[in-house]
Image (cartoon, rainbow, N blue to C red):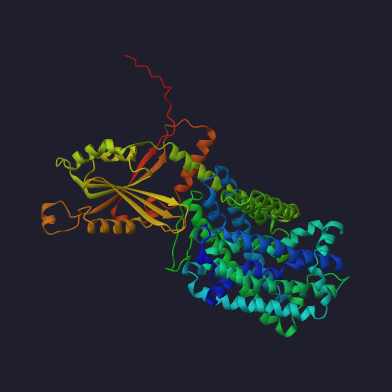
Amino acid sequence: MSSKHNERASAAGLLVALGIIFGDIGTSPLYAMQAIIGKERIALDVVYGSVSCIFWTLTLQTTIKYVILILRADNNGEGGILALYALVRKNAKWLTIPAIIGASTLLADGIITPPISVSSAIEGLHILYPGIQTIPIVIAILTLLFVIQIFGTTIVGRAFGPVMLIWFLMLLVLGLSQVIYHPEIFKAFNPNYAYQLLANHPGGFWLLGSVFLCTTGAEALYSDLGHCGRGNIRISWIYVKTCLVINYFGQGAWLAMHVGETLNGRKPFYEIMPDWWLLPGICIATMATIIASQALISGSFTLISEAIRLNLWPKVRLVYPSNQKGQLYVPSVNWLLWAGCVGIVLYFKESSHMEAAYGLAITLTMIMTTLLFSYYLFVHKINKLWVASFIVIYLAIEGSFLAANLLKFPHGGWVSLLLAIIIADLMAMWLRANIIKLRLTEFVDLGKHIGSLKELSNDISIPKYATHLIFMSNAADDNEIESKILYSIFQKRPKRADIYWFVHVETTDEPYTLDYHVNVRAEDDVIKINFMLGFRVEQRINMFLRNVVQDMVKNNEVDITSRYESLNRQNITGDFRFVVLERYLSVENDLPWHEEFIMKFYFAIKSITNSESQWFGLDNSSVKVEKVPLVIKTNSQIRMRRVYM
C-alpha cells in the first residue's frame, strides 16, 4: 500500500512539514522537564536519568515506531489511525474496537493540547510581570484561534513553516548555550542512566508519566502524512529531533548546575534564556503553541470527516473554505473543541496542573495504533517473528507508559478518559445503529419491476411528477432496490416520470477515489448509478450526477430532452427531481431494550444534524424529502376479536 511518490522531498515540502507536523511534539520542551522534576529537590541521578529517558523515548517511540515503520502504512498517501483502520477493516471485524478507542482517545486528550501549550508559553510572562493574570490571555488566544477556523488556514499556513524553523533553531541555540557549561550531560546518551532511574530510584518508574510528554505529538506525524508526504516528514525529523534533543540536554545541564534546589514554579525552558531574550522568546513560543494547536484542530476535523464516512460519527456539516487539499472546517466540532479547551483552562488554571492530566488517553491511542499496525504487517505477509517482536516490544514500552500515566487519573486524567468514553460510546452506538438499519432494510429485485416502471412512465392518465426522477438508494447491488422506494413510486402517490434514476453512494477504503458505474436497466426508462467515493471526498452528488449525465449524452446512452412536445421541439432539457427517503423509528416495533435505546439515540442525534439531502449536496429546490417508517420488528402476536352489537 506504500506510495512511492510519498518518498520525494522538496525544500517547500520540508518547510510545510515543519509548520504542520511538528507543532505538538516541538512545543513539549516548554513543560516536559518541569513536569518530571515537579516539586522535588533537583537530584543529579534524576536529571541524567530523565534526559536519557527522553532521548530513548524519542528514538524508540517517535523515530523507529512512527517515522521509520508506521509511516510506511499509508492509505494512498493518507495516514492516521482511521486511515490505517480503513486498510485492514475488511480482514477482521474486531479491528473496529481499537479503531474506535484510538480515535476517541486522540480527540479527547487533544482537547488538553492547546490549553497546556498556550498556557506554558504565556506563563513565561510571570518572570517579567509577576502579578499578571494569564488565564484571560490564554482564553483570548484560544478563542481567536477557533474563530479564524471558518476562514480556513491557507494564508496563516504559509507563515507556519518559517515560524517553526525559527522556533526549532531557538531550541537548538538555547540548548547549546547550556551544555557548554556542563558537557557531562552528554553521558545521558547511555541508556544505563535511564535504566537506573526507572529500576533503582525510589518512584523512578512513575516518572515515565511525565517523560511521556516528550512524545505526545508522535501520533500527529502519522495523522498528517497526507499533507506533507513521507519523505518530507522523515528528512525534516532529523532537524527537529536534533533541536529537541539538544534543548532537553541543555535544560538537563541547567538542572545539573542547580542540584539540591527546588524549581518553586520556575520553568527550566525559560530559565536557560538570557534576560534580554525573554520577551521575544515568549512571543516565538506563543506563536509555536498556536501553530501546535492549529495542527491539532485541523487533525480533529480530518479525523471527524473520516469517521463520518466510515459510519462512526453523525453526518454533521462539513465546510471546505478553499480548494486547497486538506482544507476542512467542521463547525460543530470546532465549537465543541473550543468549549472543551476553555473548560480545561478554567478547571486546571495552570499548565503545571494540566501536566498532571496530560498524556493518559493518548497512550491508549498509541497502543491501538500498535495493534492495528501489527495486523497490517500480518496481512501483508511480513515475517511472523518480526511482527511478534514489534508487538512485544511496543506493547511493553507503551504498557509501561500507560501504567505510569494511570497515576494521573485522580489528578485530572479522569477528565480526558471521561471525554474519550463519551466519544467512543457515540462512535460505537452510531456504527451499531447503521448496522441495525441496514440489516432491516428490505431490498427487492429491480428487474422484476422494470416492466411496471415502464408502464407507469407511459400512463398519461397519471399527471407527470418529473421528467427525470432520481432516488437515493442504499442498495449497492445493480439488481436491487429498497422496497420503500417502489412503495413511494407506485403507492404513496404514483410518481410518473420519463426516466427513473436510482443512485447509490459507496464509501471506499481509499481516500480520494472518484469513480462511478452506470447500469442502464431499460433504455431511456430505468438507470442505476453507483458512485464509489473515497472517505475524504466531499459528497456533491448534484454536481457529480450532472457530469455523469453529460458524459452519457455525449455517448448517446440517454436522451435527456423534455418529453413534452412543445419543449421537445425546442430541444429543452427536461427537469430533474430528487426524492430522498428519510427514515424514522416506527411505533410498531417490539425491540430488545438495548436496540431500542440505540435506535432512539440514533434518530435523536440525526434530528439535529444534517439531513440526507444536505449531506449528499443536493439542490434543495429540486429535492422532495419523504418520511418513511423504519419497522424493525412488528408485533405479530396480536389477536383481535370482532364483536357484534
The residue sitting at the front extreme is 383
299 relative position to 590: left or right: right
323 relative position to 101: left or right: left
201 relative position to 554: left or right: right
Give the residue displayed 59% in from the left and 68% down from the top.
Answer: 233
Image x and y of residue 535, in percent: 46, 55
Query: Is residue 199 visible in this depiction of the protein?
Result: yes
Q: Quadrant of residue 50?
A: bottom right
- Between 530 and 615, the one lying in front of the other is 530
Image x and y of residue 369, in percent: 62, 54
Image x and y of residue 396, in percent: 73, 52
The residue sitting at the bottom extreme is 276
Image x and y of residue 173, in percent: 71, 80
Q: Quadrant of residue 196?
A: bottom right
The residue sitting at the right extreme is 260
Question: What is the tally of numbered marks visible in this picture?
Answer: 0
Query: Is residue 267 visible in this depiction of the protein?
Result: no
